[in-house]
Amino acid sequence: MLINKAEYFQSMVKMLVRSLEKMEKTAELKEEDAQILSHLRNNARTSLVDISKETHIPQSTVYQRLEQYERKYIKKHTCLLDFERLGFKVKTMIVLKIRKEDRLNFLEFIAQHPHINNAHKTNDGFDFILECVFVDHDHCKIFLEELGEHFGIEQKCVYPLLQNLKQEAFLAGTSKITLPRSC
């Protein structure tokens, strides 16, 4: 019986250590962090001086926080393009269920295909959600045929995206957002 108790306490200690390690990896976001991140989400080209003035946070603090965000939170600096003005008139959301033995090849395909703007893995009856951009409906049709030729598609739904109502807006507004205790 003592061995079982010892093993139990050992496992509890290991679990506690893992929890502490997770806590170290995830930092609590403070209100200042939320303000700075909100400004960056709204316009990543905003200067440190402007962020400092608008948030009343010292410029040196903003700079230090930005360096931390680069390591912890910021995945990529990018810009949002107006695809329609660039000549890409058709935007679609394609939801797919792919045959299990084709999924690995499908992942390689979506990583390389130029018309796939965003790709997500999902569940609940489907495997993937693709946001695709095309010059016209003919190119979209060719893409869908290509998918059918190369992969075992068990289920497919294609949704034309008619109008972008909101894009990349989370944490970009000036309204106060309640942050989780740890991120």
Image (cartoon, rainbow, N blue to C red):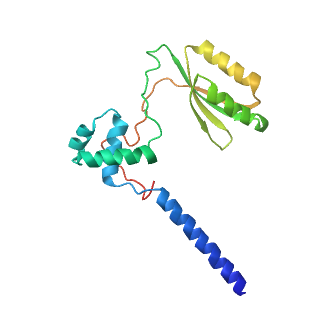
Pick the quarter of the image with the N terminus.
bottom right
**Rendered residue at 52%/60% (across/down):** 22
Is 58 drawn above or below residue 45 in the view shown?
Answer: below
Residue 123 rendering spot, x and y as whole percentages: 65, 43
Q: Which residue is at the front of the view, 81 or 50?
A: 50
Q: Could you tell whether 109 is left or right of 86 in the image?
A: right
In the image, what residue occupies the spot 67% across and 83% down?
5
* Above/below status of 180 relative to 8: above
Q: Residue furthest right?
A: 101
Residue 150 occupies which quadrant of the picture?
top right
Residue 47 image point, x, y percent: 28, 35
Q: Is residue 176 visible?
A: no
Q: Position of residue 128 (x, y in %)?
A: 64, 36
Position above or below: 161 against 102: above
Residue 55 vs residue 33: left or right?
A: left
Q: Residue 181 placed where, x, y %? A: 42, 59
Residue in the foreground of this view, choosing between 73 and 136: 73
State whether residue 175 is above or below residue 76: below
Q: Is residue 12 visible?
A: yes
Residue located 66% across and 78% down the image = 8
State the image quarter where residue 143 is shown. top right
